[in-house]
Image (cartoon, rainbow, N blue to C red):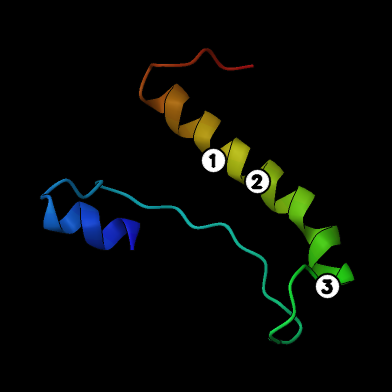
Amino acid sequence: ELLATAQLLGELPKRVFLVGVEPEHVQTQLGLSETVAKAVPAAFTRACEIVERELVQMGKWAAA
């Protein structure tokens, strides 16, 4: 929905990065399975790495 709204406003980003975790199975209950919950920290770390890399390339962040 966010990208569709950006498109309607004519403000699509040049690049989009997606980081996710594939579920073992899909069901209607709330919450994360144990497997997905264990994978979330690694996905978060990867997302942070991508953001930092992009900011460094844009000259908006000093490399660590």
Q: Position of residue 26 (x, y in %)?
A: 68, 86
Q: CA distance from mark 1 to mark 2?
A: 6 Å
Image quarter of residue 24: bottom right
Q: Residue at x 57, y 57 (%)?
A: 19
Question: Could you tell whether 5 is left or right of 53 in the image?
Answer: left
Assign a secondary structure to mark 2: helix
Instruction: Classify 10 Å Cα crowding around label 1: few (below 14), some (14-19), many (20 and above).
Output: some
Q: Is 38 situated above or below 23?
A: above
**Which three-letter amino acid code belongs to the residue tagged 2?**
Arg
Q: Which residue is tagged 3?
A: 33
Residue at the location (44% across, 53% down)? 17
Q: Which mark is residue 46?
A: 2
**Badge 1 is on which residue?**
50
- Amino acid type of disc 3? Ser
Classify mark 3: helix, strand or loop: loop
> Residue 5 placed where, x, y %?
23, 57
Q: Nearer the viewer, residue 48 or 8?
A: 8
Question: Three-letter amino acid code at disc 1?
Answer: Ile
Q: Residues within 10 Å of mark 2 (few under 14, many from 20)?
A: some
Classify residue 18 as left or right of residue 5.
right
Q: Is residue 31 left or right of residue 57?
A: right
Circle nearer the N terminus (3, 1):
3
Pick the quarter of the image with the C terminus: top right
Q: Measure the alpha-carbon separation of dots 3 and 2.
A: 20 Å
Residue visible at 78% across and 48% down in the picture:
41
Q: Residue 30 in the image: state x and y as whole percent.
A: 74, 72
Q: Tags 1 and 2 in contact by the CB under 8 Å rule?
A: yes
Q: Is residue 53 left or right of residue 41?
A: left
Expressed as whole percent of the image width and height from the top left, the position of residue 36 reads 79, 67
